[in-house]
Image (cartoon, grey):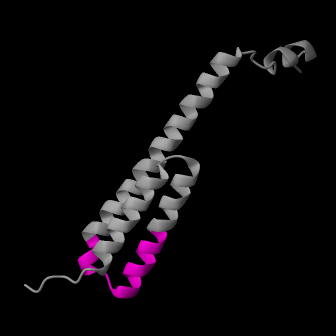
Amino acid sequence: MANPAQEKAVSKKVKRSSAKKRQLQNDKARVRNKAARSCIRTKVRDFREELPALGSEKKAESFSEICSLLDKAAKKGLFTLNKASRLKSRLAARLNTKPAAV
């Protein structure tokens, strides 16, 4: 059986300065934000590439999902509101253009 004094020593919290704590929080947020931006960029790129092959119902569903992600990203500050709106507008323009006959 362990000594109660040893158990308290093991579970003691680490005391950090507020600057170090803030730096740790910033590092975690940076990684989370980078992953979220990367995910959105990948979905937008995939949408653009798959657009000619998708059916009309699938196009609308995919576009709606991307718009939702862009709005959430703008709300969280990952993208500016203007950038999110610009991306949505450009994707909508691609969605509404008719493919050229080959």
Please tell me which residue is depicted at 32% across the width and 77% down the height of the picture: 95
The image quarter in which residue 19 lies: top right
Q: Residue furthest front?
A: 82
Could you tell me which quadrant the N terminus lies in?
top right
Q: Which residues are magenta?
A: 50-65
Q: Residue furthest left?
A: 102
Residue 54 is covered by the magenta coloring: yes
Please, what is the dominant secondary structure of the magenta stretch?
helix
Q: Residue 72: give x, y in percent of width and height.
A: 55, 58
Q: Residue 94: give x, y in percent of width and height.
A: 28, 73
The image quarter in which residue 42 lies: bottom left
Please tell me which residue is depicted at 74% across the width and 17% down the height of the picture: 14
Could you tell me which quadrant the C terminus lies in?
bottom left
Please tell me which residue is depicted at 49% across the width and 54% down the height of the picture: 81
- The residue nearer to you, when weighing 67 against 46, is 67
On screen, residue 98 versus residue 4, left or right, reads left
Residue 47 is covered by the magenta coloring: no
- The residue nearer to you, when weighing 3 against 83, is 83
